[in-house]
Amino acid sequence: MFERLLSRPPVLVQGITGSHGLFHTKGMLAAGTNVVCGVTPGKGGQEAAGVPVYNSVKAAVAAHQPQISVVFVPAPFAKEALLEAIEAGITFIVVITEHIPVHDMLAVMRAARRQGVTILGPNCPGILIPDIIKLGIIPASVGRPGDTAIVSRSGTLTYEAAASLGAAGIGQYSIVGIGGDRMRGVSFVDCLAAFEADAAVRRIVLIGEIGGQDELRAADYIARHVSKPVYAYVVGHSAPPETRLGHAGAIMGSQDESAAAKTAALADAGAITADSLPALIARLAES
């Protein structure tokens, strides 16, 4: 799934002239990402961060043939922007936008499945392959090349895990934030399958949250398919029981969705677990 990124394919940024889109486009360019064009309806013909801007994805694709889109379009307009990218032939879409309505993402995911398009997010920080490519908002400064893969539902802890690994002298092969929304594209299982198949990955760090079944599905997949060491931490060990909590997808609906239950499932599946990120990094550094 991520091998295509190693060749630094051409990238489109949707919403490139907005404050977030422009700021993070500059960051992606500085990190070596091959951003070749941007789209903001009504601003075609301009440049943003030295990148040509088009009024539509179709026009940008015709001129530059980007394979990937990174989306900063505000939530009320995100559904239309994502469907436009899918229809224009973009095959990998990273959706940074938060607060996209669930029903909008349902329509987008149906279209993506029909066209064979991979969607990372929404409401995610994106992906960073240190010294190779940055798609989204993960600070390039937290990554250093190595053989450990990170996949996380928590945006902030994605950065913290990478920085902590680096401080411990452990480099990262790829750093993937899948986002915390209930309706999203790339899952833990998708990433575990990709990391297991990639000979460049030696070990995997998985960071989950309370709420939903994703970590339980990951545990089942680890038990049946993953031979590499998995180090897992689930955020929310201090969350009170029988209380609905959280933001985005981190809503604990039953005790099975608690940090303790998910941690137990991951441990039963063979993962090395801890009840804090520093403790997890320490266990990894000792191995």
Image: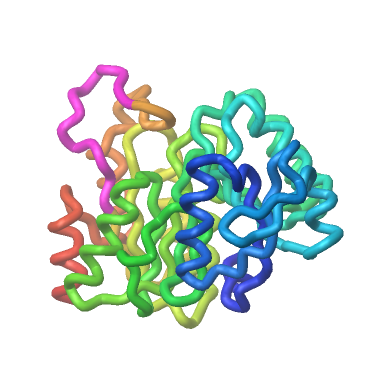
Q: Closest to the observer: 282 or 270?
A: 282
Residue 234 part of the magenta segment: yes
| Residue 164 in sight here | yes
Residue 169, relative to residue 219: is it above or below?
below
The reply, left or right, for residue 238 in relation to residue 163 is left
Q: Closest to the observer: 100 or 117?
A: 100
At x 50%, y 34%, the residue is: 98
Q: Position of residue 235 (x, y in %)?
A: 26, 42
Q: Quadrant of residue 241?
A: top left
Please, what is the dominant secondary structure of the magenta stretch? loop
At x 61%, y 61%, the residue is: 50
From which residue to which does the magenta span run? 233-246
At x 49%, y 39%, the residue is: 123
Residue 223, relative to residue 242: is it above or below?
below
The reply, left or right, for residue 275 in relation to residue 99 is left
Which residue reaches farthest bottom?
199
Q: Position of residue 47 (x, y in %)?
A: 66, 54
Residue 265, relative to residue 109: is it above or below?
below
